[in-house]
Image (cartoon, coloured by chain):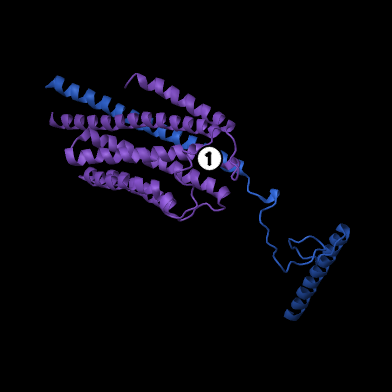
Amino acid sequence: MQGTMTKKLMALIVAFWLVGASGVRLVASTQGQSPQTPPTGQAAGAEPQDQFVPVKSLPQQEQLPAAPLLLTAYGFVWVVLLVYVWTIWRRLMKVEREMQVLSARVAEKSGRG
Amino acid sequence: MNKGYPVLALLAIALFSAAPVIVAQAPYEATMGLVQKIFYYHVPSAMVMFLSALICGVASSVYLFRARPGADRIAAAAAELTVVFGLIVLVTGPLWARKAWGVWWQWDARLTSTLLMWMIFVAYLLVRRFGGPGAEKLSAAMAVFGMANVPFVYVSVNIWRTIHPTTRVVPSLAPGMRGPFWFCVLSFMLLFGLLLAVRARLEQRRADLEHLYLLADEE
């Protein structure tokens, strides 16, 4: 009984494998390329690189753009100063509120006394 | 509050709003190009940071030797501003360096000494906030050490070998760059004066509040 079950399971696995493999082959043939093509960063047909060639300066398209750095720097200055002004204003308002409450309490006490 | 403050605040906002337009019209630097324009915010921030550290150190010395509470309040305000403008210097500098030098940070004399000075003033604020009774005097002593660092940080680029531009750059600025630069310095100095006055006032009001609490307890 157990042997039959194992055989059926093996047959099922082989069937899935065959269906899967034929499916991959079908997709590859419709796209016109082999499923075994290695996913490398090299261009198709290019020779693998076995030597690094030094250059004095980077090509224009490889260079780090300056504008985002400049805008970040200017934006950062504005944000820091605005946040700092806001924190001073908030702290000042808190102290003023507390002073009003306390002054009223002191005046009330001295009125009773 | 002083009636002149709103007028000065409006003037500072106007100058700060005009600064990017004026900086955009300044010529590009030959080797660094566009990114060199960070200079117009980076250097004035550093000048304000130095000035603020000096004010903090002098006011702390007055507080230590003459025991004047008003001097301590100015010192506390100036220390906070040293940290704020120091943060601007320490962030805008690496953004400039990334393009100009190819690295964010270099452990050379100027950058390292600036970071250390900034950390002294951060420590000043932490001691004041969490140091408990007597922390004012301890932090005042720290501020004197922080102030002593200022000339060292300033001349470090001329004494030690570093990739940071030297102090000779500002006096030798081209006429097209000189105007926008001093305009930005004026904007930053005006803003610094205002913030120092308002922040010192906050300390004054806190002292008033403390006095009022003592009065309320007595009655």
Residue A3 picture location, percent across and down = 75, 81
Q: Is residue A24 left or right of residue B136?
A: right
Q: Which residue is mark 1?
A: B38
Comparing B193 with B165, the one in front is: B165
Question: Taking the image as drawn, is residue B122 in sight?
Answer: no
Residue B62 picture location, percent across and down = 22, 38
Which residue sits furthest front?
Answer: B172
Residue B203 picture location, percent across and down = 28, 33
Comparing B43 with B158, the one in front is: B158
Q: Is residue A30 left or right of residue A56?
A: right
Q: Residue at x 26, y 35 (%)?
A: B73
Question: Taking the image as drawn, is residue B156 in sight?
Answer: yes
The tint of chain A in the picture is: blue
Q: Quadrant of residue A86?
A: top left
B126, above or below B107, in the image:
above
Q: Residue at x 24, y 35 (%)?
A: B71
Q: Residue at x 48, y 24 (%)?
A: B14
> Which quadrant: the C terminus of chain A?
top left
Q: Is residue A60 left or right of residue B155?
A: right
* Chain displayed in purple: B
A104, above or below A88, in the image:
above
For the image shown, how many numbered marks are present on the structure?
A: 1
Q: Quadrant of residue B128?
A: top left
* Kind of residue at badge 1: Ile
Comparing B96 with A38, the one in front is: B96
